[in-house]
Image (cartoon, grey):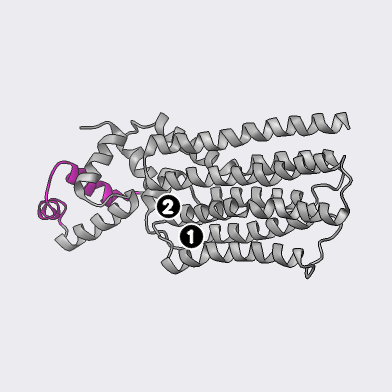
Amino acid sequence: MLIKIIAYIITFIISAGISAMGIMLAYQLYQQNRKPVFTTLLYQQIFLFSFLFYGVWGNISLRLVIADLNISDAISAKLSVFIPIIGIPFMVVSWFMLLKFANNINGRRLTKSFIFSFFPTFVVLAFALFFLIQKGHVVVPQNADLFVVRILVLLNLVVYLFFLLPFFRKTKDVGLLKETGMNKKQVLIIFAGTVLYSGVMFFFNQFGYISTCIALIILFACNLLLPAIIRLKNQTISENENMDFQSFCTFYEISKREAEIILEICSGKSNKAIADELFITIQTVKDHNHRIFTKTGVKSRVQLANLVREKTGEN
């Protein structure tokens, strides 16, 4: 029993450290960028780890307490279901913020119908399940913890499948996507981590408290991937902030002709002057401008010039 408690204490300390790191990384990103998308990421991390601490450690603490009490297996099972269900709103908000983040960095917004239906659906399902269990319409198996975990794991996988979708559709804001460092490869790494901890949690108590502790560490660690990947990418960009113009063009996937137009824009020339200089039509210049704005995530010539100066250090 003593070894079991020590193992849980060590696991608790590790998971607490990982949780603090995830929230800290998200906060640093918010402080550095001050953009709404990073506020969304910060909220996602806060609500996610709040649920994990409440749902996971609340349930473990309850188990350790009632182990020494004379409580029937039926009541113990219902309590094991009740604790995570009460914390469901935290997880639902985390899921919502995750989907909002994925859509926002791809230049999309969640529809009003989705927003208004998302929260009520999960809350109603959670309390309907609890009501059915209380009334005996749904029989909780002997291993109630595993029953609840598997339900949450499956729901979480569904949410992460929707998280993937915006990255495999045509992106409307490449600039913001590049600032976060997110691409298909990075997203698939995050999804692979989700699949990993989902599989582990599906059989978390296969070997008793040892496998439970290992599964929890993997669970918390994999949920750190999202802010860690973005923070690493931002740090790389920050270290190379004064890149040369060629590196700037490579980073934003600017073509040779678009690079020429950017230089002309930075020199203060009008569309007509640029057209005359490069022997192209004004409409062609405007088309190039639109593509440049889309790639860099700016909305005007002034913002483009400021971005070039910011990234290259050139006046």
Name the side, left or right, on which 233 lies relative to 3. Answer: left
Q: Earlier in the sequence, mark 1 or mark 2?
A: 2
| Residue appearing at x 44%, y 37% in the figure | 29
Where 244 falls versus 44 (above or below)? above
User: What is the C-alpha distance between the residues marked 1 and 2?
Assistant: 9 Å
Residue 285 at what x, y percent from top left? Answer: 19, 57
Name the residue located 58 percent from the left edge and 50 percent from the top edge: 90
Q: Is residue 53 left or right of residue 253?
A: right
Q: Which mark is residue 105?
A: 2
Magenta span dominant secondary structure? helix
Q: Is residue 30 above or below residue 275?
A: above
Q: SS of the residue at dot 2?
A: loop
Q: What amino acid is at disc 2?
A: Ile
Q: Position of residue 281 (x, y in %)?
A: 15, 61
x and y, in percent, of residue 125 in the image = 64, 65
Q: Amino acid at mark 1?
A: Pro
Comparing 63 with 33, the one in front is: 63
| Local secondary structure at mark 1 | helix
Q: Residue at x 42, y 38 (%)?
A: 30
Q: Is residue 262 magenta?
A: yes
On residue 166, which mark appears?
Answer: 1
What span is in magenta?
A: 254-279
Q: Residues within 10 Å of mark 2 (few under 14, many from 20)?
A: many
- For residue 299, above or below residue 126: above
> Hey, which quadrant is residue 219 in on the image?
top right
**Residue 92: where, in percent of width, then height?**
57, 55
Whether label 1 touches label 2, CB < 8 Å: yes
Q: Nearer the viewer, residue 74 or 115?
A: 74
